[in-house]
Amino acid sequence: MKITFHGAAQTVTGSKHLVEANGYKILLDCGIFQGKRSQSYEQNKKLTFEASEIDVLVLSHAHIDHSGNIPNLVKSGFTGDIVCTYATRDLCAIMLRDSGKIQEQDIEYLNRKRKRKGLPPVDPIYTIADALDSLKYFIGIGYHRAYKLLPGITLTFIEAGHMLGSATVILDIEEDNQTRRLVFSGDIGRADRPILKDPDFATSADILIMESTYGNRLHDPDEPANQQLATIVRETVNRGGKVIVPAFAVGRTQELVYRLYELMESDQIPSIPVYVDSPLAINATSVYRLHPEAYDEEMAEMILQGEDPFSGEKMRYTRAVEESKAVNRSKDPAVIISASGMAETGRILHHLKNNIANARNTVLIVGWQAPHTLGRRLVEGNEEVRIFGETYKVRAEVITMNGFSGHADQEGLIKWANHINPKPRHTFLVHGELEAAGTLADLLRSQGFPEVHVPARLQSFELV
């Protein structure tokens, strides 16, 4: 067996891991790398393997850093099955199309700049049409259902608890007269989160590929997320301001809406409008309603009682551009949730442009921000930022809340890994910055994991 790490190696984005076993090539995830625009374009456009040689793609979940380069994979010659959970397939149907639209818009803007410099135009990584074409290769399967992936290779998904449809991948591989189990964690979620079930534990593995995003950090236990969110909203409303939230359209937006609904129902925050200003987020919320099999007990009971936190009295879903502009023109206190989660593209840029220089407002950061993104610059406390080529003073209060992270922290990762007994012979830590992965590697070694690696991009391992 050979494993090559083509992405999310010593960094958090661009998940791509190639497993060669039993004469077949299995790609685990095919995500977009997010970073500096010039670097991202080149790295995402040029695949570091032959797409036509991949027999099957197994997709852990729909987040773009795990799924976002699938249209380029198909465009480059891949014709195999893309196997995922049913909810992941439904989310990809809207998310990949949206990603294709962003690719087209980004390249149109870039080509205008290139034309002024006398440079030839370049092509988008993929288009909306490419995204739609890729959907015909998707196959959905349920959790805990053994699926014959390839001759001698069986796939089972278990709940990862990270987002709707997220899965930990278990591959039982018969090779050289022995059966070995490879477990790919995907992104491991946190227990006791609203809406979704808790992560399942893998209990056996010979080879473990595991995420390490929070490998060197613990989530803040001091103040529950609901209380902190309530305090932020109340203080901003008392100033007469707005709460502007760059949030990923899938997962983070739905959790925010759920929590704001709870806080209003319990009179912990004023009853103010909550605008979800993202067509993708609106479509994703509709997909959530289609998959009650993913709900935790509290959410399932709420739905059975006729409550729908996604359709509360104060929830406003703005699809049209004119509706979005009207939200910006309004001077009344409100919560505005808009994509993208790292404030790099989409309508959130307009909301930041119009509100970031006003000290009454709050910019609430609720997720990890990649280096070189606008979101990262806000987290780092930059006093000025550039939006649409213009410089703006950051006078709004910028608050980071780690309580909304969909990733298990260091303690949660260790707990998850220690359910595997006996310890895996080989452990590979991915989807984490080098410091985070290195810290987690040291901890796992100290707890008896015999061989722990933090692979570099394009590094290969022959496992006998």
Image: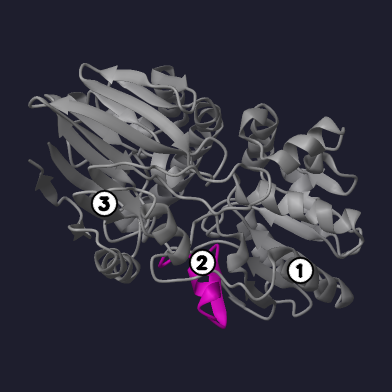
Q: Secondary structure at mark 1?
A: helix
Identify the image quadrant of the C terminus: top left
Q: Which residue is mark 1?
A: 227
Q: Which residue is mark 2?
A: 374
Name above or below for residue 313 compared with residue 444: above
Front-most of residues 451 and 277: 451
Residue range corresponding to the magenta coloring? 371-388
Nearest-to-viewer mark from 2 and 1: 1
Is 1 situated left or right of 134 in this image?
A: left
Q: Does the magenta segment cover residue 440?
A: no
Q: Determine crowd level at label 3: few under 14, some 14-19, many 20+ residues with C-alpha closer than 10 A.
A: many
Residue type for callout 1: Gln
Q: Determine crowd level at label 2: few under 14, some 14-19, many 20+ residues with C-alpha closer than 10 A.
A: many
Front-most of residues 315 and 339: 315
Question: What residue appears at the point 39 percent right and 50 percent down from the top-left corner?
Answer: 419
Question: What residue appears at the point 21 percent right and 16 percent down from the top-left corner?
Answer: 151
Name above or below for residue 289 compared with residue 414: above
Residue type for callout 3: Lys
Rendering quarter of residue 456: bottom left
Residue type for callout 2: Leu
Identify the image quadrant of the N terminus: top left
Image spot of residue 336 (x, y percent): 74, 57
- Sequence-wise, the earlier of marks 3 and 2 is 2
Tag of residue 423: 3
Rendering quarter of residue 360: bottom right
Front-most of residues 169 and 387: 169
Question: What residue appears at the point 61 percent right and 72 percent down from the top-left corner?
Answer: 221
